[in-house]
Image: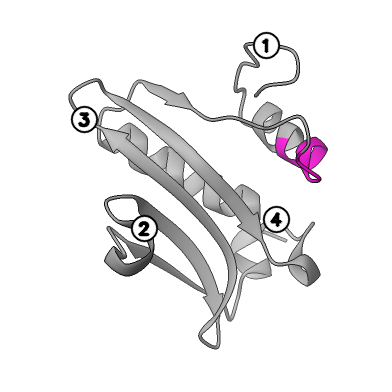
Amino acid sequence: MSLERKLKGFELREFESIQDFLGSDRVIKIEKDNSLIAIIRYSINKKEKDSWIGYIETIKNQRGKGYGTQLMKKYLEKMKKQGIQIIQGRIDEGNPYREAALKLCKKFDFEIDQPGIG
C-alpha cells in the first residue's frame, strides 16, 4: 500500500509563515479535521543556500505511522526546488525521541557530524 493511501483522509497543508507563532520560520504540517497530526519547522537562508530544521514533531498517538517520513519528503522536495544545498539540524543528547530522530535522519542519508549531535 502506498503512503498516499495510508494518508487518505488527511490534508497536507503548507504555510510560508505563521507570524504569531513562528515569525519568519516556515512550516509544513499534516492535519486531520483541523487537528494537527505532524509538523516540520524550518528556516531558509537563500543567500547561503542552506536550511535549518528546527524540529519535526508527530502527536503521540500518531507516531510510527509514516508522518515524519511524509513531512521530510515534502521538505526535501521544496529545498531541491529552491536550490538549497546544505541542510542542518541538531538532535540534543537529552531528547526523549533521539533514536527516532536519528533513524529518520539516516533514512534520508543525513550525515551525523559529531557523536551525540545530529
Density class for disc 1 (Cα within 10 Å; few <14, some 14-19, many ≥20) is: few
- Asked which secondary structure carries label 2, the reply is helix
What type is the residue that disc 2 sits on?
Answer: Leu
What type is the residue that disc 4 sits on?
Answer: Gly
Q: Nearer the viewer, mark 4 or mark 3?
A: 3
Mark 2 = which residue? Answer: 22
Where 74 falls versus 35 (above or below)?
Answer: above
Density class for disc 2 (Cα within 10 Å; few <14, some 14-19, many ≥20) is: some
Mark 4 = which residue? Answer: 66
Mark 1 = which residue? Answer: 114
Q: Nearer the viewer, residue 3 or 99?
A: 99
Give the alpha-carbon distance from disc 2 to disc 4, as whole Å. Answer: 25 Å
Give the alpha-carbon distance from disc 2 to disc 1, as whole Å. Answer: 28 Å
What type is the residue that disc 3 sits on?
Answer: Lys
- Asked which secondary structure carries label 1, the reply is loop
- Asked if disc 1 and disc 4 are in contact, CB closer than 8 Å, the reply is no
Give the alpha-carbon distance from disc 3 to disc 1, as whole Å. Answer: 26 Å
Mark 3 = which residue? Answer: 46
- Asked which secondary structure carries label 3, the reply is loop
Give the alpha-carbon distance from disc 3 to disc 2, as whole Å. Answer: 18 Å
Q: Earlier in the sequence, mark 4 or mark 3?
A: 3
Q: Nearer the viewer, residue 19 or 62?
A: 19
Percent of width and height locating residue 115: 75, 13
Density class for disc 3 (Cα within 10 Å; few <14, some 14-19, many ≥20) is: few
